[in-house]
């Protein structure tokens, strides 16, 4: 007889179709499908989670062969005993019950358990032991080819213009998961319908992409002309940096149309399909992200709060370079990466090292900022030209 795997972990970012895949497996095998989500167990009374798990497995045993699917397993499966901030009795008892149930049936009962997560690194080691979720299946965000294929699926029920370039759509949606693409197709159809069009056109899709990235366009958001100028020069600064820095991602689009609650504008880039980054690439990434603030500094002689998000990002990258990737000479080839870091207060290094880390991060960012200002000062005319074009047209697609 064939020996079945008992459990498999589907690992990947949200929206990549992990639930769909699990359902499809059950459909393909023509067996019942039972599911629950880890987030259902948050803030539950003690004991309820464990009894829910018990019930689920009881039902499954009666209906076997079948597939059990646990979405967001990290909500219950986080490593035990590391959280000092809040009581986690409930999560622990739920997790314990799950482990008991998984051990309680053999591979011959015909029950297969699939669980989905995007944080396998925080899971309790007990879950990953042989006989439990000992197999991991990675479900990543689609590359450009994958996105094109997904677009084709979601475009089927939509009446699209003959001129629609599906490949270009796939190119313009880097980092989009399947669910985002479904969203874009849906939005594009709505936008076209609102305009009374017979078929959905490229422009409708581009508007839909903007909407999915940044939220709804705030048509009645009042932005003073002075603020608009600052935003335009800020975004132009990012864009020109992205354009000239050798290792930065290619610029896709820059806009100053206000959207959602936070974004006053944004520059969108095409991330390369890559998994390793070298020091030069990370430094250029930092410079590009500092481009907004540097541009404000150069053109207006003062800075605004508009760079807060940019600064958060570069602070994260800079600290990672120094403390995680071993990219700093003084700190050396060490990595203090700890997936549980968010739940502990102890640092794995001395006070002295801590000081050096802060200094080195500070210096790295200061140098990057100087380099960014130098570049933008050299290309001042380009920044001004682009910013003025943005003020006139509100968004610009290069090429
Ligand atoms: Zn910015």
Image (spheres, rainbow, N blue to C red):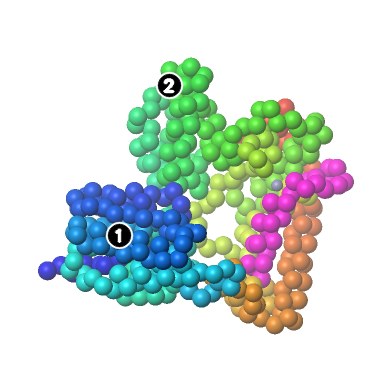
* Residue at 31% over, 64% down: 54
Q: Nearer the viewer, mark 1 or mark 2?
A: 1
User: Could you say where residue 238 lies in the image, as x and y percent from the top left?
Assistant: 70, 46
Mark 2 residue element? loop
What's the magenta region? Answer: 295-322
Of 183 and 251, the residue lying toward us: 183
Left or right relative to 171: residue 101: left
Q: From the viewer's perspective, is residue 270 above or below residue 152? A: below
Residue drawn at x 30%, y 60% as measured from the top left: 56
Circle 1 SS class? helix
Q: Earlier in the sequence, mark 1 or mark 2?
A: 1
Mark 2 — residue?
199
Q: Residues within 10 Å of mark 1 (few under 14, many from 20)?
A: some
From this view, report whether residue 282 is shown above or below residue 192.
below
Badge 1 vs badge 2, beta-carbon distance below 8 Å: no
* Marks 1/2: CA–CA distance: 47 Å
Is residue 175 visible to the viewer in this orientation of the structure? yes
The x and y percentages for residue 298 are 83, 46
Residue that appears at 25% across and 58% down:
59
The residue to which callout 1 is attached is 56
């Amino acid at each position: 007889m064939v020996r079945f795997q008992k459990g498999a972990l589907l690992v990947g970012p949200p929206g990549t179709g992990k639930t769909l895949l699990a359902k499809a497996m059950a459909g393909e095998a023509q067996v019942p499908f039972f599911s629950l989500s880890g987030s259902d167990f948050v803030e539950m009374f003690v004991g309820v989670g464990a009894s829910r798990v018990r019930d689920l497995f009881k039902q499954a045993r009666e209906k076997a062969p079948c597939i059990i699917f646990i979405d967001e397993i990290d909500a219950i499966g986080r490593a035990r005993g590391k959280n000092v901030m809040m009581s986690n009795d409930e999560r622990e008892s739920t997790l314990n019950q799950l482990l008991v149930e998984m051990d309680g049936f053999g591979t011959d009962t015909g029950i297969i358990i699939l669980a989905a997560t995007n944080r396998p690194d925080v899971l309790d080691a007990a879950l990953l032991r042989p006989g439990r979720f000992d197999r991991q299946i990675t479900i990543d965000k689609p590359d450009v080819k994958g996105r094109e294929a997904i677009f084709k699926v979601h475009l089927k029920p939509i009446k699209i213009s003959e001129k629609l370039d599906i490949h270009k759509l796939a190119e313009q949606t880097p980092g989009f998961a399947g669910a985002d693409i479904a969203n874009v197709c849906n939005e594009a159809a709505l936008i076209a319908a609102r305009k009374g069009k017979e078929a959905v056109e490229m422009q409708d899709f581009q508007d839909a992409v903007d909407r999915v990235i940044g939220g709804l366009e705030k048509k009645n958001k009042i932005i003073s002309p002075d603020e608009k100028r600052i935003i335009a020069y800020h975004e132009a600064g990012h864009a020109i940096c992205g354009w000239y820095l050798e290792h930065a991602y290619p610029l896709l689009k820059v806009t100053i149309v206000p959207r959602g609650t936070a974004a006053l504008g944004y520059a969108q880039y095409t991330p390369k399909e890559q998994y390793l980054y070298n020091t030069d690439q990370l430094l250029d990434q930092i410079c590009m992200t500092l481009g907004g603030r540097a541009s404000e500094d150069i053109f207006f002689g003062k800075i605004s709060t508009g760079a807060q998000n940019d600064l958060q990002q570069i602070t994260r990258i800079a600290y990672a370079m120094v403390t995680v990737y071993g990219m700093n000479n003084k700190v050396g080839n060490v990595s203090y990466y700890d997936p549980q870091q968010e739940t502990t207060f102890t640092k794995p290094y001395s006070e002295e090292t801590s000081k050096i880390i802060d200094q080195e991060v500070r210096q790295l960012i200061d140098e990057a900022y100087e380099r960014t200002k130098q570049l933008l000062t050299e290309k001042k005319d380009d920044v001004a030209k682009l910013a003025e074009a943005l003020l006139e047209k509100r968004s610009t697609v290069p090429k």
